Amino acid sequence: MAPRVRYRVLLVEDNPVDAMRIRQLLARSRTASFEVESQASLAVAQERAVAGDIDLILLDLDLPDSLGLDTYATLAAAVPQVPIVILSRPADEELAIEAVQAGAQDMVLKPSLSAEGLARTIRCAVERHRLVASLRGLSLTDELTGLLNRRGFTTIAQGHLRLAGRTGCRFVLFFVDVDDLKVINDRFGHHQGDQALIRTAAVLRQTFRQSDVVARIGGDEFVILALDGAGDQGAAMQRRLATNLAEENAQPERAVALSFSVGTVAFDGRLEEPLGALLARADRALYVEKRTRQRLATAIRGCPTAPPLAEAP
């Protein structure tokens, strides 16, 4: 039997009961071993992290000497080479999500912690962070949007899938198509078409975590490989995408309203399904979603009592 991987974890938590429970959970893990060091204040934790020899930080955002996002920002700036996972109470979940959007690898809710679930989160966060760090500086980005290009997506996503095969992480693959991009180009000009793609990239960045793999792989096609941390097969991320898209379209002086078609595939990385097969499944899901919307639009237009469909301003 291969030896268990060992991780050095800095636990930054001022509640001694929570700190003890987390240490006990990690001690019970059968898939990895953890050397846990606890600190109760940001100042001491920062000093310890800067000293090195830490694989990951488990961070409570509310500490005696720092509160909220400033806690994460201070520690992340001090040790950008160390991945951080946020510890949160359910009442503070939105704040924890903001920290993830700012660059934290992941967040976990304290009441929902389990030994293997927490161990898996740590392993995934460390491996993702190492993978992205190893690929920095390569020419893997789309010039227009600044997102990954097809090559960048393939390179990083395949690394994530190899990681998932070892750790049992679950992912959701999103295939996003910008509706009627050709119409936008023909009616408003290619500048507005480019702006629609740039705005789409901004909505995706706002929706997904920095640790998720977000790319533009074709003219109007975007893909996202996201960790299914909530275990809801991407439902929460889809709701967040819809909300952020509506907020983007509500911005004043938008010449064109954006519309997306989205196909999703949730999968268990342990099944080791090839990336090409996953993309094909997501593309088929996108086609089904687009056809369903077209049938619905036709039905609405055919109903004499229905209001007219809204058009781009």
Image (cartoon, rainbow, N blue to C red):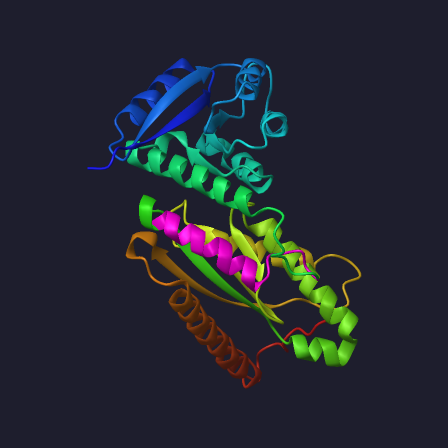
| Placement of the C terminus among the 4 image quadrants | bottom right
Magenta includes 158? yes
Q: Position of residue 4 (x, y in %)?
A: 28, 33
Q: Using the image, determine if residue 299 lies above or below residue 247.
A: below
Q: Residue at the spot x=41%, y=63% of the render?
A: 275
Tell me, yes or no, if residue 246 can be seen here: no
Magenta includes 17? no
Q: Residue at the spot x=32%, y=46% of the render?
A: 166
The image shows a total of numbered marks equal to 0
Q: Main secondary structure of the magenta part?
A: helix
Q: Position of residue 30 (x, y in %)?
A: 24, 32
Residue 73 found in image quarter: top right
Residue 51 found in image quarter: top right
Left or right of 110 in this view: 1: left
Q: Position of residue 72 (x, y in %)?
A: 58, 29
Q: Nearer the viewer, residue 255 or 149?
A: 149
Left or right of 186 in this view: 49: left
Q: Which residues are magenta?
A: 144-164
Q: Nearer the viewer, residue 65 or 226?
A: 226
Left or right of 169 in this view: 303: right
Q: Using the image, determine if residue 135 lies above or below residue 238.
A: above
Q: Nearer the viewer, residue 288 or 198?
A: 198
Left or right of 311 in this view: 292: left
Q: Position of residue 298 (x, y in %)?
A: 53, 83
Q: Residue at the spot x=39%, y=54% of the render?
A: 233
